[in-house]
Image (cartoon, helix red, strand yellow):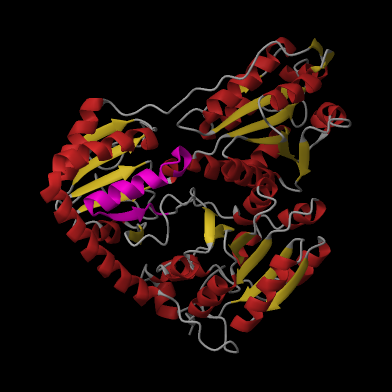
Amino acid sequence: MKSGNGSDLFLETLIDEGVDCMFGNPGTTELPLMDALVNENRLDYILCLQESVTIGAAEGYAYATGGVGVVNLHVAPGLGNAMGMLYNIKRAGTPLIVTAGNQGQRGQLSEPVLWDDLPRMAEPLTKWSYEVRRVEDLEQSVRRAVKYALTPPTGPVFLSLPGDVMLAETGGLTGRPTRLSSAFPAPAESIERAAQMLAEAENPYIVTGSRVTRSGAVGEVTRLAERIGAKVFSDNRPNSLSVSLTHPLYAGELLNTIDPLLDQIEDADVVFFIGTETYTFSFPPEGPLAPRGARIIHLDLDPWEIGKNFPVDVAMLGDPKTTLVGLTESVERKMGEAGLQSASERRAWIEKELAASRREVAPKAGEDGGPLTKETFQAAFGEALPQGTALVDESLTMGHGGGLKSAIAGKIDSIFGMKGGGIGLGLPSALGVKKALPDTPVVCLSGDGSAMYAIQALWSAAKYDLDAVFVILNNKSYRILKERVLRLDGKTQEHRQFVAMDFKEPELDFIQMAGSMGVDAVRAKTPAELKEAMQKGLAGGKPYLIDAHIEYERLEN
């Protein structure tokens, strides 16, 4: 690029920063950008029909590539539509560049239609929020945004792009990308203190999160767990594979209500949190948390999370992968032959205990011609998944109890989940994952209620030949709300009537909805039908939807 306008410079800067894909929903203020894209073949623009879909798709893309996702929205209403999904991205710490066109600066004082103070709107949910006021600042703003989004603790940033800036004449690039390495270990003193604590532990537990995955530290966590004989848990609401589901020391996900969660880790004398939140609660505790006697170590690149909820005995600010190498070596030295032998015996006992518990939760397939219950769905779904699947999991009630993870263990190479708790992420995220991993089978699990938050994602899947398989877990209700309202032991429990929680009269027809957006679909009511549909969808080379009718235990009178 020798010369052009702000839109040309914006694209050129993104490309120079390594961006090759953008998800967007344009409006009038984005027309300069759309004009600049006419003959730009180095960057794909994926049109999404609703703004929350753009955010979810970009997050899936960012997670699957390990890079940054880029979103383009339209003024205040577009950003407003995206805010719910942007909350999920904040909680997940996904590196995202969210941009929105804004009305030109001239006349903003008169508050023209669609204008608003976009940086102030985005600020609560982003690491940095800024409006570019001069075309001379555009390249620097984009480069700063990419750098900051990718710098741990990673997360979304926002840039407002006024129309006059995007149309202003400008020259070519003058800068270059900046990347900050985070591969630094925690301080030596904290490593030695943590090593001593782990060497002396009689029943250590490890809890892992998404920043283990981002650090590439799954192998290092596994080695440490094996050496000290520790159960390994993934955090609640996991949105990545931070520990292998097939490893014999894997003890499952932590629960997301406080008392059952504390029960899970009650036997531990040392709990080592690595790259994880502590914790995301559905029902927050009434006061400060007490770990019931266990000492706490926390290793993370996010200082906010260290000591956030539990008091920490050893705080370790550093990269998990880099730190764990030295930490494991120090633990081995401090344990000596006798300690390592004791840990090996503890490991054998733990593996035997966990193997028995996995057999208890493993779903039973039942008859292929019987109904799709929670258990028979899990078994049939796991059987139908091919090796190396990337799973996008937004199943809320289906994943409870460990049966789903047991069924898919050994089949999936990566998992993408919902960290923030706001529903509707599944279908859009599958778009981005499939765009990033075109040669990998991608399967999305979403509830019927969740799917309706972003059903427009199916159109984009068809438009751009993103051949994910979308499995809708259809129970014709917000099942999770029904289960939880019963716990209030109020009028719902007494009368067994549920207000505003059913999708009936009329029922949702996902087959017709998918067909109207160019996606083939089939209904499955038995395990045999589900497996046949999965086989067809995975082999079809185009997006495919399965409307899986799940029969749950009746909660009504």
On screen, 391 above or below 487? Answer: above
Question: Is residue 440 shown left or right of residue 113?
Answer: left
On screen, 434 above or below 493? Answer: above
x and y, in percent, of residue 340 in the image: 17, 50
x and y, in percent, of residue 232 in the image: 32, 54
How many marks the image carries: the answer is 0
Viewer can see residue 526: no
User: Which quadrant of the figure contains the N terminus?
Assistant: top right
Which residue is nearer to you in this view: 50 or 320? Answer: 320
Asked where in the image residue 383 lies, by quadrant, the reply is bottom right
Residue drawn 25% across the image and 38% down it: 329
Q: Is residue 221 magenta?
A: yes
x and y, in percent, of residue 137 in the image: 68, 12
On screen, 270 above or below 260? Answer: above
Residue stretch rendered in magenta on the structure: 213-236
Viewer can see residue 140: yes
Which residue lies most toward the front here? 337
Which residue is nearer to you in this view: 313 or 43? Answer: 43
Which residue is nearer to you in this view: 128 or 206? Answer: 206
Residue drawn 68% across the image and 30% down it: 99
Which residue lies most toward the left here? 338
Residue drawn 63% across the image and 67% down it: 472
Q: Is residue 473 magenta?
A: no
x and y, in percent, of residue 10 in the image: 74, 22
Asked where in the image residue 229 lies, by quadrant, the reply is bottom left
Residue drawn 47% across the image and 64% down it: 409
Question: Is residue 534 shown left or right of residue 265?
Answer: right
Asked where in the image residue 191 lies, by quadrant, the reply is top left
